[in-house]
Every structure is written in structure tokens, then in C-alpha cells.
Amino acid sequence: MRTTRSPFAHDKHDSVVRLCEQALPELPGIDFLAFYDRGFHVFSIGTVTDDERRPLERAFRQLVTEVGRFDDSMRVLGTGELMRTVVQTDDAVLQCGHVFEEEFLVGATWDLERADMMDADISRLVTRIRQEIYLQPDQLPGGRRGPRDTPGVESTAFHTETAERLEPGLEGALATLSGGVVDVNDVHYLALYRDWGFTFSADVFGSRALAHWFGGPSGAEAARKLYADLAARLRTDLPELAYALRLFSEQPIRRFVLDVVAGAVYVYPLAHHNGFVIGVTVFQPEVFAAEQRLLGVVPRIAELLGSE
Amino acid sequence: MMTETPVIAFFSTRPGVGRTMALCNAALVLAGAGKRVLILEEDPGAPALRRYLSRFLPDRRREPLTAGPDDWTAREVPIDSPGHHVHHAVLRPGALPSDAIRATRYDYVLVNAGTTAVATPVLRSCGQAVLCFQLSPHAIDEAAAAAREIEATGTRVVPVPTRVDLAGGEALSTARQRARGSFSRGPEVEIPYVTDYYFSDALAAMAEPPGGGTGQRAAYERLVEVLSGGTVTTLESVTVVHAPGYDLWAEWIGAQAERWGVRVETPALDAYLERTPVDLRAGDHHAAVLFVGPSTGPTGLEPPVGRAVRGPSLPGRGLLRVWVDDEPLESLRPTGGEIDLRGSDEADAIGELQARLGVSGSFVPGGDGAGAIRFPGRKGLVRLPPREPGFVGRQALLSALREPLSPRWERPGRCLVHGLEGRGKSALVTEFCHRFRGAYDTVHWVHAESAFTAREGLRELAETLGLPAREDAVATLLDHLATSDSGRWLIVFDDADDPAGLDGLIPAGPYGHVIVTSRSAAWDLADRVEVAALNPAEAIDLLTRADDRISREGAGRIATTVEHLPLALTMAKAWLDRELNHPKRARRTIEERRSATVERFLFSFGHVQRGLEFGERPTGVHAVMVEMLLDLLPGHPGSTGAQWLMESLTFVSADGVPLTITRSSLSRGYAAGLIREYGDEFVVDVLLRLVHEHALAQLEPGPKGRVRVHRLIAGLISARMTGDARADRRAQALQLLAWHAPAETEGPGAALYAELGKHLFSSGALDSLDPMVQRWITNQVRYLFLLGERGSWAKAVTIGEQALANWEAAGAAVEPELVNGLRVQLSIVYRALGRLADGFTLSQRALQELTTTRRSHPLRFIAAGAHAADLRATGDFDESYHWDSVAWEGMTRLFGPDHDWTSRSLNNLAVSASLNGKPHAAIDLAMRRMDGRLKLYGEADLGVWRTALTAGVLLRDLGRFHEAYELLRTGLEQLAGHNAKGGRRSLLELRMETSLAAAERMLGRPFEALARDRETLEELRSLVGSDSLYTLLCRAGIAADLHARNEHGEAASHGAHVAEHLARMQETHPFTHAARVNLACYTRAAGDQEGARELAGAAHDALRTRLGLRHPYTLAAAATLANQIVETDPGQALELEMRAHDYLVRIFGPEHPRVRAVRENLHDTRRRQVRPGATDGRRHDFEIEILGN
């Protein structure tokens, strides 16, 4: 791997560069890594040629700008700042991790088999930089991996909403499918958008266990509206994100994760239906587990809608 | 009966003898002489008089010309002479109403008494009666009988033979003899026969020039002279004698007199006195001598006391003084011998001259055409240095200069005034300009010591004239001066030693004059005047003016010593004044003092000269005089400060420095701190006065006052300083100048930069490493950029590059934010000049260095914004979006969201977002900025409407055509309110018009859009030129309008022009490809399918590579390409359309007009695949609207 420092690199970045260079041999999931400070590219590490590297740095710089916009959107949800963003296309995956203040680390791999590994490696590297250089705590980006260490809680307030004039049988099928996924332990919200319009949603925002997040007289209702607003914006946000990343991958986005301080929002575009499935958890440790469950249900939803 | 007003009847014993013609001609000669004339018609049914008078009505209408008997003033007939007219009325039957005539204010009443041989009541009540008759024996006898009868009633009869054949020979002689013997007073006047007048309505009084001495008019003039008792005579010559400085008035009055047909000469007073005998100086009955000069004091033409001089007593003849100076009217009491032109406009002045001299000028046409002399009393636009107070003599040189700069505009009018330094070239030309300023509508002085100052001077003139702010103000000015719209102008390029420096700056065209003053004679100008030393008499005059303390003989010795050089003489005069006023000199008689002072001067001069020689320093007369004057300073309060001031002034421009700077609080405080001996801030005023009185500097008081040091003196002062002293003084001068650099670089507060810019080169500011001076330089570059014109940008580049080279030089320790601040500003100017690569490199370097050294410095984000603009200009839209984001976010953090910089960066970010394929984000940002500005500044804020212009395009991009239309319409209404004076519309307004037209087109109103675009195109061409991007975008709109109206051929022609010119700007820019996509639509519609296919294919590929698959431009290009190939390759067309639709629907949504259009085309393509020929072939086209920011 070769390190390339940008003309924008500052002396204070030396320690970050050294740490990354030392850590990378132990982080095999990462093919390419780039660091940005206040939108300025600082350094890159990877095996790519210069001609390949420059478009990547440019694309990742665009990504950092887009992450800033998504961060603004996420903050209104009340679950904290955006600290990890994952974008996966048909041929590549990247993760943009927020390090500290306005510093971002972007890692990528073109081997989709190693997507998880790359994601976890970047999260580890971000946490190391935070802890060792900025003396900041671990924010647990990507959540906890492994079995849950707290007992499961029974869901008490399963709530669904359906668009008018849904095909007969679809509502029930979706309710059944989501009933097996949405609960207070990890996946707190799941929604389906088709032809750029709302189709179905299920949530447990009304559960007592989530009262800290959605308590109060209009808490659950307000949260549903906020997530609906977020979903509505995705119709335009997703193509803009795809355009920003065109020098990294021109393939369609298949997975998009917005990991905030408390939980994450997951977006899985449905290519043939002009829509997507959106999932939410507000438990940070369960971010990984929640996605695993969602990844299981998304193909089944697509199947319900027709060929995908 | 007699009234105070002469009443003269015209009658004849037979009809058809030319009576009415005689009356009319007499009336016109009287009116032309400024007399008020009433014509009374005894027979209301007689047509002849009305026929003659009707020719003076504008359309020769035959309407009733005659007023009723009770209202004589109701019918005024103007004659062809300014302000002159006659009145015409019907006479009530019976005797003349003498009381009524007395009550009027007519000078003459002429009565057309018809044909009679007896003393009618009318004839009896007239003072005189003109009896017209022909020279036949019977007619003479008949007339004589009638005359006798009428004269018996007390009315004087003036017999006038008419239709006299002057070629009558012996018969005429006999007839004349008979007539003389038949009347109590023989005929004094006879009217010759001229065929033309009897076969037309022409009148000799109008058709022939006055004072000609022959012809029919001369006969009528003689008749009027007889009737008026000699008080109305014919003017035959006018002599306009003028005092120095009044040449121009003499020229103008002379030109007017020439139009009256009289002999004219315009001698200078001295020349006139020299050549004209005393007795003849004051004119006679037929000659007026007009003196133009100072309004008070003797003219020099008055007869010597006690000497009887033959002179006329008639009004309008003899010596007349013409008042032209703008002195208060009440300060002068008219005595009858003056013609007062003060405060008159040209028409009034001409009328006054004609009235007073009794002439009419209607018969010479073309007096106002090309070559006419300008009325000196008309106020012009004058920017000149003040007159040299000690200017004397030089009349020959002034005349020599006036000759090529002819009042008749017959010569090229480009004149070089050259001569060695200190010869008084500038003073001569200043005097010339002041004397002849009235000949021009514009007189402008340009300090031309360098190409920069020359351009700046011309730019100032363009600004003063209010010329439209096109890209290059100087080019606009030069274009303007080449047209008659500019009026008459004189431009002086002073102190221009290098012809190359004025290359392309000397205005061309026949409407103005140019003077160049230079030490060099190597100029290619049509005419030249060399200025040498004064002649001895002039030199003595200069030394002795208004001062009898120096004898002319002593003055002559001093003048010889200083070689008759004007500057040295002025300095010598100052030395003499100081010496003669010295309080410590011993009291002596005037004679002794005169002699002693001259001797002291000559001794001092020799002594100083020897000292200089000994010190191996320059020993020329100017060097000696500078030393002599500096030697006088000790002993005066603040004398050491005076030397400091002089040394400091050597670092400012030759144009001097304004008193607003030298006497500002900053300068006062600085001087008081340096010069302890005087003790307070008033030391500056003392010093200025001191150096002025010692002729070392010239102090011009007043609100626009300046202090100037002659370049020769400045050079000598500079040469006598040591190296250390020069460095110290320079640093102090720079510090003072830099202190005055305002914080604002735009708006009224920034005006001082125009002044500071003059001193950049003379002060050596560009070499300075003083941080304060460096900030001034950077702001100076920004100020020049914000002036918004190419000439200023070029100057900004020269300044910026020179300073940057010095700051970047090895060993120069310059603060990073200073050097990078300059780089940022310079990059902005490069971009404005189209030097995109240079701008890009510089802004990138600034950004890099600021990022590594000052991570949170505001300049870093300003640099990011500048770099983003460079990237936008080169078509790197994604990168520009990134840097605009960095800039906006950084500025928001540092300055807050409402700061002006933040707000501006938000607008740029909206533009970049749109160009980067983010239409929704773009409109959100634009609306955020608009709302923010509206909240803070209200609707009057121009920033609101600048963003509205951007928002208009963004709304249309999103298919929100109505919203775009309403927003732009509101914006235009607001801006029209800003521009209530009815002047030219601003670029912002015109761009909004183009944008509004696009909204109209998209709303399905291409007719309105085309009309609006065409009108706007003309205004844009006039405002910013044909090649401007904004003009091209308007033309692109016209192409789209025409296409929408199915005028495809013309649309293709306009579209091709736009694509070609955009390619010339930047071949690979996305805008160029976008224009080609549009052109492909028009070309195909015009019938060239092959050409359209090639265009669309190439543009699509280029956009695909440059902007990526998903960019809206690429998608529009794909849809357009599909249209070109749907017939030949429907499979590929389908693929392109499917992809375009898929991405477009994600960006814009399914109901966006463009998405619907692609969808319908897609269906059409599918139908074609299934059943070829099943469609009507109508498909949607896609216009890419180029944002252009």
C-alpha cells in the first residue's frame, strides 16, 4: 500500500497518517482509504495507480459533501449526528466514517464478499483515531457484532399504516412479513415505498421500551412523520448520491446505511419498482443485528411485489 | 395727426405697381433690425398681403392671417429670424385710432392703404405715406398730383418709383429727371425690377443678404433708412476685437456675423490697436466694433480724453462692449453701449446680437451643421487643472495651437506640444484649455505619464459621461467619441513621453481635438507646437507682474540668468517675493532695495551653482533654484518639516495628492508625531503653505484641492536625498497612503482607491513588504476587479503580478494570508479576463497554502469560493460544488449565516448544485438565500433579485414554469423601480428579461418570448457587446423561441452562432456541448438529419464523459440523440430513452414535463418497433437551458 499526501495536508495530520499506515496491514478488508479534513483531501492509502486514485479521491470528496447534507437531515430525527455512512452498489462498497469535528475517513473495497469486513475495519480505524489521537470515546459505529448481551423484550405496540388502494392481499402479507422483523429489540421501523410513493409501514414506536425516544403524547406520530419525510426526500437524494459517486461506481445503489449516534437508518432501493425499503433502529449496539434481519426480509418484500 | 409710434401708409394711385411688396419688404427689414412692426390692412378682402405673409407659417397654410380690428396682437407672424415677427391686423374703416396705436408698444405701424389718389382719412392720420408709382410720364404726373393733395393735409409723402428697369438707359434718365421735378421732395429711393419677385411670392428682404449695396433688398434698406430718419441703417461690417482669453467668444460672434452676410474680422486687441487709426477704431453708421473682454475697466478702444472722434450715435453701430463673463448681473449697470449675453442660451444670444445690431440671419442655411462653432456660453463637462497663476504671454504659441485645433474643424485636430522639461508645456496647454473650453462640450485632462494613468483618466471620463458599463470602459469611450453623440470634445494627454504608452488610446473621429504634451518630439501626430523658453519681454513680465519692486532692467538680468525658463522664472519670482518681504532686511529706499535684491539674487545664484559644481551635482538653473529656495526655508516655523514634506511628496504621482489626504486626521496626527518643533496637528497646513509660497509645490485650495510638485523639482529633491533618507521617506509615505486605504472595496466608501491607485507606481508600493501596504495592494486589486471593466482588470493583473513576484521572491518574508489573499484576488481577475488556467492555478495554490498554514482562517474559505468559481468556469461542476460547499459551510461557521460573504457563497453554491445535477438542492439553497436577504434587507436589496435570477432557471429546470414566471416578473418590476430615471437597464435586468422569455416559451407563449428576447438582445449588445456570454445566452433563447414557432431554419442559424461562439470560449465546456445538443434539434427540424445526428452523437458522448451518465445534460443529450436515430436505429434509441427516463424520473419525478416527454417518445419508439410506420412521427425535443453563471 502506498500513502499519497495531498497538498492540503497539515502537520497535525501526521499522527493520523502514521496511525493509518500502521493499522492498515491488520485491516485486510480495506482496498483504498482516504482522509478528509473540512472538505479538503489530506491523504490516501491504497494500491491503486495515480490515474485510478485521483477520481476516487474526487468521488470521496463529493461523498463527504453529501454526508454533510445527510447529517443535516438526520439531526432533526433526534438520534444524534451521522457517524457512519455505507453505500453499496453492484460492484463496490464504501464506508465514510466521521472521525472528529469535520474529519472523515472513507474506505472502500471492490470485493463485495469483503464488504462487511471493510465496513468493520473502517469503524475500528475511526475508533482508534478518535481514542488515540483525539482522546474521544468509542461511539460504536456499526454496532455490536455477536449475540445480544441483554434479554429480549416483548413488543407491545405494533403499528402499521397502509397506502390507499393497495392490491388485495398485499397489505396482509406485508403486515405478516414485517411482524416477524419489527420489534423493540432491534428493527423499530420498516417501510415500503413503491413508485416513489408510500405503500406500507410498521413500527413499534409506541412501545414503553422506546419511550425514551418516542414518549410523549405525539412522540410516535411525530417520529413516523419525520421518517416519512426522510423517505420522501430519498427519491431525489439517492440519485444525487449516485451521481456524486459516479467516479467510484456508476452502478445503481443497492444498500445505503446512515448510522447515527443512536441507531441507524437503512435504505434498500428496489430497482424495478421505483422505490425502496427503509428500516430504522434507535439502539446503537443493535445496528449490525438490525441490518442482518432487514437483509433477510428485503428480498421477500421484493418477491411480494413481483420480480426483482 | 402724429403719434409717438411712426405710422407709415403705403399707397399708390394705380394697382399692380408693387405697393404691397414694398410694404412687406420694408416691414421685414424693420423686423429684422429688431423693430416691432404692426401691419394694418385697410382692405380686408385684398389677397396680396396675406399671400406674402403666409409663406412664413410652418406649412404655408392659407388660414386667415389677419387679426380683427379690435385685437391687433392676436395674429403674430414669425419671420425667419430668431425671435423676430410682425403683427398683422385689419383696420377698422375710418381714421386711424391714434389712442389705440399709442397704447401699443410697436416701433413702426405700416398701413396698407390701397389704391387712391385722394387724401383718405387713413392717409391724413399717418405721419408719412409711401407713394408707389411707375416711371411712366402719366403715372409720374398722377402720383405727383396725389402727393400734393395729401401733403396739404400735413402728411409727408415719400415718393418711391417701383419696377424700375435699371437697364433703361436714356429713357430711365429722363424719367428720373421728370420725377425729381414733380414732387416737393424728389424720390430718394427707387425699387428696381427683378423678374423673380414678380413671378413668385419671394421677398427680397428674405432672399438677399443684407448690406449688399445692390439689388432690391438694398433699395428697401435705403427706404427704411429714409422712413426711419436714419435710425435704422444697414450693417455692412462687424469687427470683433477681443482681449486675451476671449478668443472663443470672438470666434463665435464672428461666425454669427458671417451668417448675416456682413464683412467680419476678429482681431486680437493688440493687433487691432496697432493697425487701426484712433479715429476709425469705434466704427461708423454701417460698421459695428464689438469688444469682447473683461466686463469692467477700459476697453482700450475708447477715444483719448479731449479728442473729438467721429462716431455714430445710432443704436447697434459703432463701439459696443459685449458682456460674456458670468459676473453677477446686478454688479454691472448697462449704459446702452453693451450687448449683454451673460446667462443667455445660444438662441437668446443670437437674438440679442441680431436685435442690437439690427440684422437678420435667416438667409444663410446650415449654420448649425458640422463645422459650426460651438456657443461658448453653453456649459460643458470640464475636468482641468487650474490655470497657472503666473502665466504670461505665449500668445503666439496659443494662436499656433489654435490653428490646428481649428474652430472650423477643418484639420485632423491632433496636436503634439513638445519641449524640454520646465518649458511650461502643461501650463500653456492648461491656459489654452481654459481659454477655449467654451468650444467644447467636454474637456478632459488625462495624466498620461504611463499607460495606466492614461487608461484610468479615460475610464474616469467614461464614468463621468455615464456611458454604459460594457466590459471595457475605455473601448466604449473611444467608440462614443467617434460618433456625433459625443458633441465637441478636447482631450489632453499630459506628460506622455512614450508614444507606445498611448497606443490605441488616442480617440479618433472628426468630433474632437487631442493635445499630447511630451518631452519627446517622436510622435506621429498631424500637427505639433514646440515650446521653448519665454522671450525676454515675457520673462520680464512674469517676474514683475503686479509688482513694481523690481525694475524691468533688474528683472531682465535675472531672467537671463535663469535662461528665460518659465519654471525657473516662477521659482525666481517666489525667491524675490520672499526676499523683498523679509522682515529682517535693512530699511532702504525703494531704489536701493530693488538694486540690492537683484544683486543678492545674482550673487546667491552664482554661489549656489558653484557649490553644486563643487559637490558634483547637477548645476542647471532648476537645480540651483531648488537649492536657493530650500536655503530660504530655515527661519520659518516648521521649516525642517517643509523639507520632510517635499521629500515625501516625491513619492506620490505627478498629478499630486489631494488635500483630503494630506490634511486628513491620519496625516495630521502622523505629521505632528514626526515634527515636534511645531507641536500640533496644524503643522500640515503650515507646511503646505510654506512649500507653496516657496514655489516648490503648487497648492490648489478648494474641496477638490491638491498639492502638486513639478516632476522636475521632485526629481531634483529626490536626487539630493541619501539612500537611507530616501528609504525612510518612502516607507513613511507608503505608510501614510496605506493608512488611507478604506476597508470597503465597493460602493461609495471605496472611491479613495481611485486616488490611491495613482500613487502605486510612483511610491514603489509594489516592492514594499510592509503588511499594511500589502493589504492596500490586495484591496486595490479587488477594487479594480469590482469596477467591472476590462481595462481595470488588466491594470489589476499588472499590479497584482508585479506585487506577487516581489512578495514571492526569495528572502521575502510575507505572511501567508497576505500573499494568498493577493493570489485569490488575482485569480478572480484572471477568470474575469478569461485566463481560466491561470486563475485555477493561482486559486488552487492559495487554497493549498492557506489550508496547511491557517486551517480556520476566513481567507481559506474565500479562496475555496474563488477556486469553485474557477472550476465552474472550466466546467468542472462537481468539483466546484464541493468547494462551494466548503466555502459556504466554513463561512457559515466563521461569520454566521447572515454575513454578506456567507450569503454570497450560498448563491454560488446554489448555482454549483444545479450545474452538478442537484436541482432540488439547488432551489432549496437559492430560496434560502432569497428568504434570508428578504428578511434582512427587504425587497430593495439587489442580492435578492440576483438570486431570483438564479432561482428562475432552477424553477424552470424543475418544471415549475409559472412560479419562475411570477418570480421573474416581480423581480423586473422591482428593478424597474430602482431604475426610475429612465436610463439604460442594468445587466441584471436584461438577464432577467432573457430568463422571463424562457419562462414564457416554456409556458407555451413563444411569440411573446421571441419579442422579449429580440428586444433584450439589442440592449445586451449595446450594454455588454455581441460576444458576451449573456448576449449569447439571449441569442440561444431566440433560437429556442424560433424553433417553438416552427421557424427552424432561422433557429438553426442562431443556434449555430451560439454553439460556435461558446466553442471559441471553451471547446470542451459542457455549455458548448449543451448548445450543440440544442442545435441538433433545430438542424433536424430544418431538414438536415445527417448533420443533426452527428451533432447530437458527438455532444452526447462528450457530456457522457465529462459529466457522467446521470447528469441532466447527458440525459437530455441522450433523449435528443434518440430522436436523431429513432428511424435508423430504433433499438439504440430505445435503450437511450429507457436510460434517460429511468434516471430522469429519479431526479425529477414521474410528472416532470421533461420526464413525460421522454416517456411519450419512448412509447413512440416502442410503437415503431412493433409496427413501423404506425406513428405520426411527432416527437418531443429537449432544450437544455444553459445557466451561464
Image (cartoon, coloured by chain):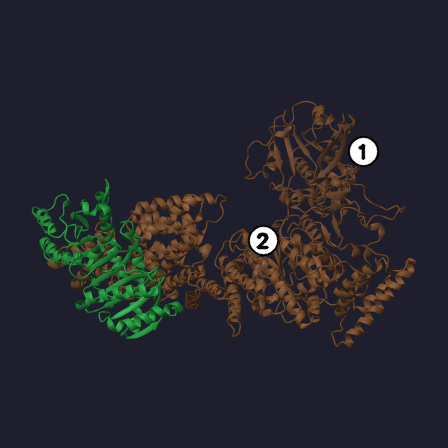
> Could you say which quadrant of the image residue B635 lies in?
bottom right
| Chain letter behind tag 2 | B
Residue for point 28% across, 56% down: A82
Amino acid on which the number 2 mark rests in the picture: Gly
| Dot 2 crowding, Cα within 10 Å, few <14, some 14–19, many 20+ | some
Label 1 to label 2: alpha-carbon separation: 61 Å
Q: Does residue B420 sit above or below B1177 in this rendering? A: below
Q: Which residue is mark 1?
A: B184
Chain coloured green in the rendered structure: A
> Could you say which quadrant of the image residue B633 lies in?
bottom right
Return the residue nearer the eye: B1090 or B630.
Answer: B630
Return the residue nearer the eye: B77 or B561.
Answer: B561
Q: Secondary structure at mark 1?
A: loop
Q: Which residue is mark 2?
A: B487
| Left or right, residue B759 beside residue A286 | right
Across and down, in percent, residue B561 comes to 81, 69
Hue used for the chain lettered B: brown
Figure label count:
2
